Amino acid sequence: MIRCAQCQKEFTAPEYKERVASIAGSIQGDEYVETYFFCAECGVYTVEYYHDRFCDEESVSVSGPLPKPRGDAKVELIRQCPEPFNKHCPCLAHRAYFGESLD
């Protein structure tokens, strides 16, 4: 269950209409997936971080609130990628998002 980091409103599964963007990347064999949820009531983003460690257990954490302008910029960057769930995508958006550390 994901909640808004500011007002604690529950984002409802299974469709998660508040989920606006996700991107995956592979860094040193680990998979990272970052998912942005937008709360229309608060006007802020909550970010879920999924980390699948190559040699260890996976973890999930949540952060926020992320101000709308910063979240909008991240979402816009993710939307420039043709395959945001492809952790090996070599596009400019992936490289800009994750930096030069992608596998």
Image (tube, rainbow, N blue to C red):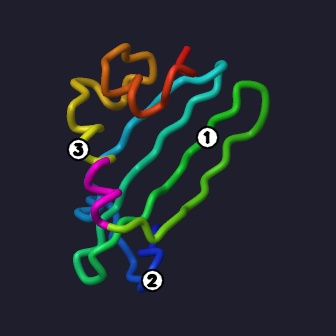
Percent of width and height locating residue 96: 39, 28
Q: Residues within 10 Å of mark 3 (few under 14, many from 20)?
A: few
Name the residue beneath numbered marker 3.
76
Dot 3 amino acid type: Glu
Q: Separation of disc 1 and disc 3 at Cα?
A: 22 Å
Q: Earlier in the sequence, mark 1 or mark 3?
A: 1
Span colored in magenta? 68-73
Mark sitting on residue 8: 2
Determine the secondary structure under disc 3. Answer: helix
Nearest the eye: 39 or 66? 66
Disc number for residue 51: 1
Q: Nearer the viewer, residue 82 or 59?
A: 82
Separation (CA) of disc 3 from disc 2: 25 Å
Residue 82 left/right relative to 1: left
Q: In this view, does 88 lie above or below 80?
A: above
Q: What is the secondary structure assignment of the residue under circle 2?
A: loop
